[in-house]
Every structure is written in structure tokens, then in C-alpha cells.
Amino acid sequence: GQNIDQPTEMTATEGAIVQINCTYQTSGFNGLFWYQQHAGEAPTFLSYNVLDGLEEKGRFSSFLSRSKGYSYLLLKELQMKDSASYLCAVNKDNYGQNFVFGPGTRLSVLP
Amino acid sequence: EPEVTQTPSHQVTQMGQEVILRCVPISNHLYFYWYRQILGQKVEFLVSFYNNEISEKSEIFDDQFSVERPDGSNFTLKIRSTKLEDSAMYFCASKTASGSYEQYFGPGTRLTVT
């Protein structure tokens, strides 16, 4: 079956750094996505990794290790507005587009 | 800034009724998607659509579901005979050419089946 695991909840302090981990076991792999979702809103795209290594985009970075089935999202200089759920998703179709989402990690940023 | 729009924002229907959820993707986008999210649960992929046909669909997307691009702007999801368990938020998303990976999500339609 398809399985993506993330911690359910995390708490961090404004200005700090937080790392949200994601492990996956899927029948295929054609890229891993991170999305941010505020309560009651649609997901918004944060990052995409298809090759091993780190992708940096401003305060957000994402890392992928395909051999370990592992990714993390790193958020630096946390702000209150970063309080949201962070969703890890895998395109499990090697040639097309068929996505499996993790349960999401709810991050609370405290003052 | 261009955005994906969805109508209605909230749809209430009785079990067994047909519903059509509407989406207007970003105008130069070529790939279209439907997702659903049951309250408090994870986002689930339903279907991807390209070049006027379904390219992939999940196990959830059974014969009760269909998608259509009736004109150059709309992209619809039809549920033929709704069940209580179809109650969820339905998100439409679109993206541009095949080399791009960023999907833009619409605000969603909350479907309540009573």
C-alpha cells in the first residue's frame, strides 16, 4: 500500500527554526511536494524535490533522500503566520500524476 | 494575479442527488486536478485531466464520479448519486506545461450530503 508518515503536531517559538519530517513508502516515485494549509483554506505549494539533496527557497528549505524514503521541510526565522498544517505529498506514478498525501503536521508558532 | 476559482463555495444536497462542482482553472494552464478533503482528514487525490481526457485517477474515483471540460474555461466534477460519505471539501487545482510542478489550488467547495 501507499504510506506517508508525518508527526501530527509540533510547536516552536517565533524566530526559531523547525524541521518537519516525512517518511514515505509508495509503489512509485516521481517527486515529493510540500504544501502549507491554513485552517479552512486550500493548500499552497511550498517546494518540490525529485532528486536527492536540499532545495532552498527563502525561509523554507526541503530535503530529499530517495534511498531512505525520507524528506524534511525546514522553516527558518519562524513567524506567527507560519502557524498552519504542512502537508507532504508524493507523486507515486513514475510516468504520470497520481498523488498521495500525508496526514499533515500542524505547526503552532508561539510568541 | 491569476487564480483558480470554484463555485459554489458551499453546496448542500440530499443523499442520492446529483451534484456538479465547478472550477475555472488559470487560463493558460493545461493540467487539471480534483482533490477532496474530509473534515479533519488528509487531502486525497481524485483525478488528473489533460488534453480533454483523464490521465490518472485514484481508487476513490469510481463510476459515481465524472469530470468534464465543457468549454474552454470550466472544469467540472459530477457526483451522480451522492452518499453521506461524499461530504468533504473538494479542491480543484491546475498547472501549466508538463515541465512545471507547481499546482495552484482553488478555494474549494464544501459539499454537505444530508
Image: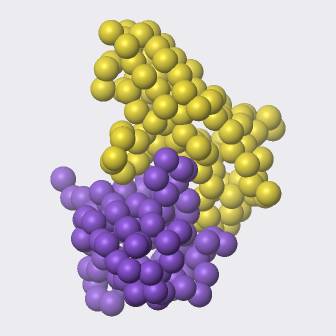
> Residue A95, relative to residue A1: is it above or below?
below
Q: Give coordinates of residue A18: x percent, y percent.
A: 51, 17
Q: Is residue A108 above or below residue B93?
A: above
Residue nearer the viewer, B40 or A15: B40
Q: In the image, what residue occupies the spot 51% across and 83% down?
A: B65
Left or right? Give the position of A68 relative to A106: right
User: Image point 37% across, 13% down: which residue?
Assistant: A110
Q: Position of residue A15 (x, y in %)?
A: 37, 9
| Residue lying at 61% horizontally and 72% vertically, measured from the top left | B60
Give me the residue at 40% from left, 73% from top.
B114
Residue B70, by quadrant, is bottom left
Please indicate, yes or no, whether residue A63 appears anywhere in the rendered image. Answer: no
Question: Where B48 falls versus B107 (above or below)?
Answer: below
| Residue B101 x %, y % | 49, 54
Q: Which shade of the palette goes to chain A? A: yellow
Image quarter of the C terminus of chain A: top left
Chain B drawing hue: purple
Quarter of the image for the N terminus of chain A: give it.
Answer: bottom right
Seen from the viewer's position, the closer of residues B20 and B6 is: B20
Please indicate whether residue A47 sits to the left or right of residue A37 in the image: right
> Is A39 placed left or right of B60 in the picture?
left
Instruction: Give the quarter of the image for residue B67.
Output: bottom left
Q: Does residue B103 appear in this view?
A: yes
Count of marks placed on residues = 0
Residue A98, by quadrant, is bottom right
